[in-house]
Amino acid sequence: MDAPIAHTALGDLRGEWQDGVAAFRGVPYAAPPVGELRFAPATPVQAWNGLRDASRHGPIAPQVASRLRVAMGDFVREQDEDCLTLTICTPAPDGKARPVLVWLHGGAWISGAGSLDWYDGSFLARDGDIVVVGVNYRLGALGWLHRPGIVDVEAGTSDMVAALAWVRDHIAGFGGDPDRVTVMGQSAGATSIGRLLMLPDARALFHRAIMQSGGFGRGAYTAAMAAARAEKFLQLLDIDPQSADAPARLRAIDVPRLLAAQGVLARANARFAQTMPPFMPVLPSAMTQPEMLGAIADGADGKAVLVGATADEVHAFFAADPAMENPPPDAMAARFGDAAALARYRARRPGASAMDLLADLGTDETFLQPAMRLAEAIATRGGNAHAYLFDWAPPASRFRACHCIELPFVFGTFAAWRDAPMLAGGDAAQMADLSAAMRRAWIAFAQTGDPAHDALPAWPRHDADRRPTMRFGARIGVAGDPACIGF
């Protein structure tokens, strides 16, 4: 069979067939962010002459190994600042207008890539007759440093907007419908979708949203907070933030020094039993959590939203951390705030270790309760929200149903996750069946805005009274208030 060819206004691309799906890799959606474009907003990519090869992945954004590799496993890919590319999987680059699913990966804005085999969109594209687009965006300081006068625009957010604009303008050449775009993200990707929903120009570029394990409980950095952190970062690089040559000196710093300074900054700002990343999206001014979730819900007006979390998110961060094995009693008491709160968590998990209780608190504060409150905020505004909880883990796994564990089930990419400790000991047949149920739900949502399908129990829209939430686990069914908001 001849290689698939996609025709766009920028030029033609040659991909390759992969198990009946046309895969296009390393597709540029913006100009390389190097030289004068380093730390600058994404700039339109230039057209090319002739047929461009898109059969191989391009480099991923510069990064160090993820702190969650103890649960997820690890990966090795070529890294380079010239990383603003897409991975597109489509049943065929024809004239058929299929729903489009755009994937924004997680990794705390400092690690990961949309082009990893973990996120191969072939299964979703083939099963659902949809087009799946994975986005590589800038990470760490190169994408998320904010200091007015030196770095004025959040480059990482601009990358995401540029990728969505590219999809609007060119996805028809890959058999996709620019008027049926669902943006899907996990962790940092999900939180970034929340930020995109708050930006009028950005939210106009997509029509539905799937937010998996967004860390909305962390809030966001205000411009003032981000600028203060940026000044500390610049000082680590021996750059005076007040100096006129600060922007030029920052652009000249090599990648290893930037990554090393990131690590120092992260360690300096680490707090006991918390998971705050060194860089985050920036809000112009301070917002309480209800205000932020309300602003996201307002931005979701007219869009269907699927939002949820895993049952034991923070076990991914704490279960393999020696510091969490026997935490100091005074630090633990301070983290919970009072004895009554600690007693409530002990009552919920009989026989729990101190680490379990701290992880439960972190899961509730950062991921689970904010996800359910976002669904509630959308519902109370008359919007269309469905909520889910992923609650499966291998027997006796120390990671439990942790952060990221739902990803191989959503993508169906178990072969790529074969070395993930969080999946070790799982029953392959059960995992395959659960994955099939979830993939059908995510596909149905991308197609219609409703994740229900005939192999699932009834899945009603979210409402503030019943809080119906589809629980995906060893048993699948709707639960009320799984986040214990009313507890």
Image (spheres, rainbow, N blue to C red):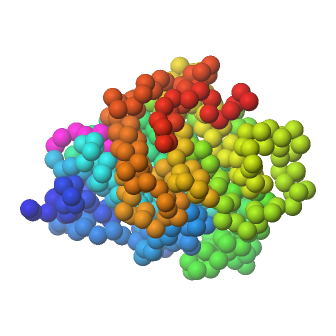
Can you tell which quarter of the image residue 486 is in? top right
Question: Picture coordinates of residue 59 (x, y %)?
Answer: 40, 71
238 or 392: nearer the eye?
392
407 or 392: nearer the eye?
392
| Residue 35 at least partly seen | yes
Question: Picture coordinates of residue 226 (x, y %)?
Answer: 70, 56
Residue 100 within the segment the image draws in magenta: yes
Relative to 458, is 141 above or below? below
Horizontal arrangement in the rendering, residue 167 relative to residue 284 (left or right): left
Say which residue appears at 59% left-offset and 21% top-offset: 466
- The quarter of the image holding the C terminus is top right
Residue 317 within the segment the image draws in magenta: no
Can you tell which quarter of the image residue 25 is in? bottom left
Q: Which residues are magenta?
A: 95-104
Can you tell which quarter of the image residue 227 is in? bottom right
Question: Picture coordinates of residue 214 (x, y %)?
Answer: 58, 46
Figure disc tally: 0
157 or 274: nearer the eye?
274
Say which residue appears at 75% left-offset and 48% top-offset: 351
Say which residue appears at 50% left-offset and 70% top-offset: 74
Relative to 176, is 16 above or below? below
| Residue 203 at least partly seen | no
Q: Which residue, as the protein is rendered here, is positioned at the far left?
A: 1
- The quarter of the image holding the N terminus is bottom left
Say which residue appears at 84% left-offset and 54% top-offset: 332
Horizontal arrangement in the rendering, residue 53 relative to residue 343 (left or right): left
Q: Main secondary structure of the magenta part?
A: strand
Horizontal arrangement in the rendering, residue 463 relative to residue 161 (left or right): right
Question: Picture coordinates of residue 80 (x, y %)?
Answer: 45, 74
